[in-house]
Image: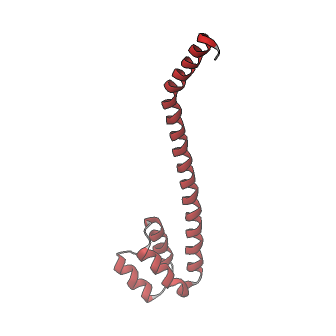
Amino acid sequence: DGGPAARAALRAAEKERVRTAPADASARVAAGAAERERTQAELRAASASAVDARVQELARKGRDGVPGLMEMARGDGDPRVRAQAVRALARIDDPAVDAFLAGLGARR
């Protein structure tokens, strides 16, 4: 058993654990949130790099890349991707591109 002194020490240790548990839990939650944010930032950066590469690839194709760029400009959920696609389209001299950009309200 350990006697009254051992029991008192166990009770004191348990009280201390209970007292510090919320702070420990808050610290773990904050650390988890920070880790998630870092991971999301890394994914966004990787995704942005992939999008940049795809837009450049389509832009290098010239007129052959127009359908893909138009699709990105029209339907991507990220406004940065749409803007990138519109900029790439604006560098391509094609009447269909001119009409498409005019429909978006974009200017060369």
Total numbered badges shown on the rendered structure: 0
Colouring method of the image: secondary structure
Task: Looking at this view, name the residue that lies furthest to the right.
Answer: 2
Q: Residue at x 55, y 69 (%)?
A: 51
Quadrant where the C terminus is found in the figure: bottom left
Q: Which residue is drawn at 64% across and 17% down?
A: 1
Of residues 81 and 89, the one drawn nearer to the viewer in this rendering? 81
Q: Residue at x 39, y 82 (%)?
A: 100
Q: In this view, does 90 lie above or below 63?
A: above
Q: Give the x, y percent position of residue 20.
A: 52, 26
Q: Give the x, y percent position of residue 71.
A: 45, 79
Task: Looking at this view, name the residue that lies furthest to the front.
Answer: 1
Q: In this view, does 80 lie above or below 103?
A: above
Q: Residue at x 51, y 35 (%)?
A: 25
Of residues 57 and 23, the one drawn nearer to the viewer in this rendering? 23
Q: Give the x, y percent position of residue 18.
A: 50, 26
Q: In this view, does 22 lie above or below 85?
A: above
